[in-house]
Amino acid sequence: MITKNLSLATAAVVLILGCASIPTNSQTASQAEAVSSTPAASTPATSTPATSTVVSSTPVGTNTKAITKSRSGSFVSAEHATNGKASIVQENGTYFIELDAGFKTSENGPDLFVILHRSPNILNISKPPDYAIAENDYALIAPLKSFNGKQRYEIPKNIQPDSFKSVAIWCRKFNATFGFAPLSGV
C-alpha cells in the first residue's frame, strides 16, 4: 500500500513538473536541480509540451568557417626569382588562391597577375628567357597585390580549379612567367 501511494505521488510530481527534475543528456545535474527546486505552486499545471534545451557542441569563439586545403605547391622560378608556396583552398563553397608569408617575386615587372595554368611545369612547355604562355592554357585570376607576403585571391565561380595544375605569377604586358607553383595534393 505504501509503495502504491509512493508511486502515485511520484507520478503526480512528474506530471506537475513535466519531467523537469529528470536530467536529460542536454542537462547537467545542477540544471536539473535548479528546475526541480522551483516551487510546484509557481509551475502552471497546463498541457503545454516541455521544451528541450539545445546545447551546441561548438566552443564559444570557435571559427565555424569550413576551410579545406585542396592542393598546394612551392614556387619554381622562371624569368625572375620567385619563392614561397601557393595553395588552393575551399571555404564555404568558394575557392581561393593563397600565397604564404614566404612568397616573394621580383619587382621588375609591370602588369603582374596571379593565374591558374593547365600545365604543372611551365618551364617544359615554354622557352627562356620569358617563358611565354599560350592564350588558352591559363585563367586570369587577379592583379598581384604585393611582390611579397601573405595574400589571398578569390577564384571566380566560372573557373574550375581542378582543371589547372599550377598557380603562376605572370606579366601580362610582356607575356612573361615570373614563377609558378605546381599543385599537388587532394
Image (cartoon, rainbow, N blue to C red):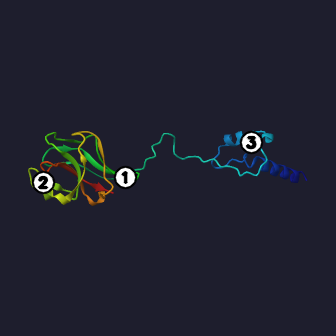
Give the image quarter of residue 4.
Answer: bottom right
Name of the residue lying farthest toward the right: 1
- Kindly report the distance in space between the C-alpha atoms of the residues bearing marks 3 and 2: 77 Å
Q: Which residue is mark 3?
A: 36
Q: Secondary structure at mark 3?
A: helix
The residue lying at 87 percent from left, 52 percent from top is: 3
State whether residue 119 is above or below residue 58: below
The x and y percentages for residue 109 are: 14, 42
Mark 1 residue type: Thr
Confirm or deny contact between disc 3 and disc 2 (CB under 8 A): no
Mark 2 residue type: Ala
Sequence-first tag of 3 and 2 = 3
User: Camera-side residue: 83 or 47?
Assistant: 47
The residue lying at 27 percent from left, 48 percent from top is: 86
Question: Of tags 3 and 2, which is closer to the observer?
Answer: 2
Sequence-first tag of 2 and 1 = 1
User: Camera-side residue: 129 or 158?
Assistant: 158
The x and y percentages for residue 75 are: 21, 48
Q: Secondary structure at mark 1?
A: strand
- Kindly report the distance in space between the C-alpha atoms of the residues bearing marks 3 and 1: 49 Å
* Residue 119 can be seen in this image: no
User: Which mark, residue 94?
Assistant: 1
Q: Point out the image quarter for the C terminus.
A: bottom left
Position of 185 with respect to 173 (left or right) is right
The x and y percentages for residue 124 are: 14, 58
